[in-house]
Amino acid sequence: MKIIQTSVILLLTFIGYRMLNSRAKRRNLCAQLNAKRTALANGFNELEQAFSTLSTHEAVQLLKLTELSLSELRQQLTNKHVTPEQVLSAFQLKILKIRKLGNSGVAEYIREANTWVKQISDQKASKLHGIPISLKECWCVGGYDSTMGLVKFCNQPQQEDCVLVKTLKQAGAIPFVLTATSQAARTMDGFNPIFGHMHNPFNRSNLPGGSSVGDAVLLAQHGTPLSIGSDLGGSVRIPAAFCGLVSLKPTSMRLSTRGMSTMTRHSVIHLNGCPGLIGHKVDDIADLMNTLLSPLMFHLDAYVPQIPFNENAYLSANQRRLRIGFYDTIEHDDCVQTVPSVKSAVARTVSILKQAGHQLIDFTPENPSKVKELFLRAIFADGGCELLELLSNEPLGPALKFMHLALYQPEWMKRLTDWVVQRTSYRPLAVFRYLSGLGNASSAAALRFELNDYRVQFQQSWDKMGPLDALVCPVMAYPAPPKNVSSKFVTPSMFYSFLFNVLDYPAGTVPVGTVTAEHVKQAMELSKADDRQNGGRYQCEILKLQKDTEGLPLSVQVVARPFQEEVVLGIMRVIQDAQRQ
């Protein structure tokens, strides 16, 4: 009896200790958050005070600069019609204006930018000389936090600039603002408890994408000329597509990641995050690549191959006949199939490229089920332990609450869930067993060989087609979905993007029109048809989500072999220019 009483007392003591400890940690996080918000408010108040002497006319004239394209801004600077200081002031003023609307995508502005802009020489150092540029807060700037939307990382400033920031500054560009990410850089809902939640600029009722959501939201509102995000599973391409922007995920080692803050240090293996470039026009991305691929970057990071930007390869995409593969959906029970608007965007792109004289060939990716397995096993190599630790005591958004719950399930429950789901029409959701972790070094080593084997298999398919020079395909299965959509309809669609992280092929996105009333009508008609003809009940639910998508941006993805970023950008430029004509 005494043993039972003692056990009960010990158990209650342990539970009480855990509750008190958790409450104390939440109280500390609350204090950290309040301190951070106070510092942010003071900083933006100082910036606003600096513009308090501007007349209304002067403010209007400055804001007009933010509506210019990058090439127009550069021309204004070259002709000395404006100074770099005026351009910086224009975008700082624009940030203040957008921020008051509650959807800026800004984490914090970089105070030292006003000093840096005065230090750049009159001699033009690059195509971005005198141009302000924003960066996702994972790219470390000395003296500023890299929170990734987690309160526990507030008020812990980085010690020095990352390689990309050093390279930009030497080139005469002005890093002037850090952009916010979705929480823990793991979701597409724009939830951020520190800097404010973010919404799709085209329709606040739709998802903005993620995790480089701040870059896309700010850029779409002309709050920055260019931005650098990151991409591990579509993190820059998806928000770019949802917000009607151009983006590029390079081969993982084409640009330096030294000095990049990451939330996956102890959990992701064999897949590498990389810088993700995002802008309004393809030429803007080419200029940014050209600037970053400099002798300084090659010197600061010896592991980056010394491959300068190939201007000729970029500009010659429309001067030679290319063999380009394409697909508009993945016809497989384990994959989400694309909706009519996305298929139409691919069809329009195929037509544009054929008219430009290129050869278009049907292509089908090998073994899509294996890709999902490889990606999830690599992303959750530790079974989600690091992510759960990062999320402890944090205020969670809906998407992370779902992921949090899934990761906490015992392995037998995950396998049982998949077994049940695989016997229904919801097969794209049968991924829970891959969240359990690798368990030992042998499994980790085996995963590396499986990844390499798949890459060889994919390359063989690519080469059998000609070989191909490039590939055109969807970015996601649908345009930006509603904000209240369940995570079960979002995560499986990421296959279309993370396929090229698994392969480590460069991939870019380019806008191709918007969703029309006819696209919506087709989706609604298909959703009412026989479930078995349209991918089952799960696919019908996806089609029903298209009800209010009219007017949302559509994009396609362009892909090439590793280190062929110039080919990707060149084809994107052909697609972009054809639409303007």
Image (spheres, grey):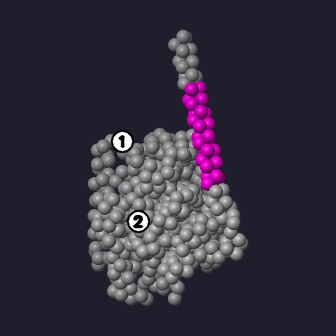
In the rendered image, which residue does mark 2 sit on? 170
Magenta range = 16-43
In the rendered image, which residue does mark 1 sit on? 439
Q: Which secondary structure class fits the magenta region best?
A: helix
Is residue 152 something that shows in the picture? yes
Give residue 137's position: percent from left, percent from top. 50, 56
For the residue pair 493 and 544, the one nearer the viewer reads as 493
Tell me if 257 is positioned left or right of 93 in this view: left
Query: Looking at the picture, does residue 231 appear above or below residue 313?
Result: above
Residue at 35% from the left image edge and 79% from the top image edge = 311
Is 208 in the magenta? no
Give residue 381's position: percent from left, percent from top. 39, 47
Query: Looking at the picture, does residue 124 appear above or below residue 19?
Result: below
Q: Which image quadrant for residue 524? A: bottom right
For the residue pair 83 and 36, the one nearer the viewer reads as 83
For the residue pair 481 and 213, the one nearer the viewer reads as 213
Q: Quadrant of the N terminus?
A: top right
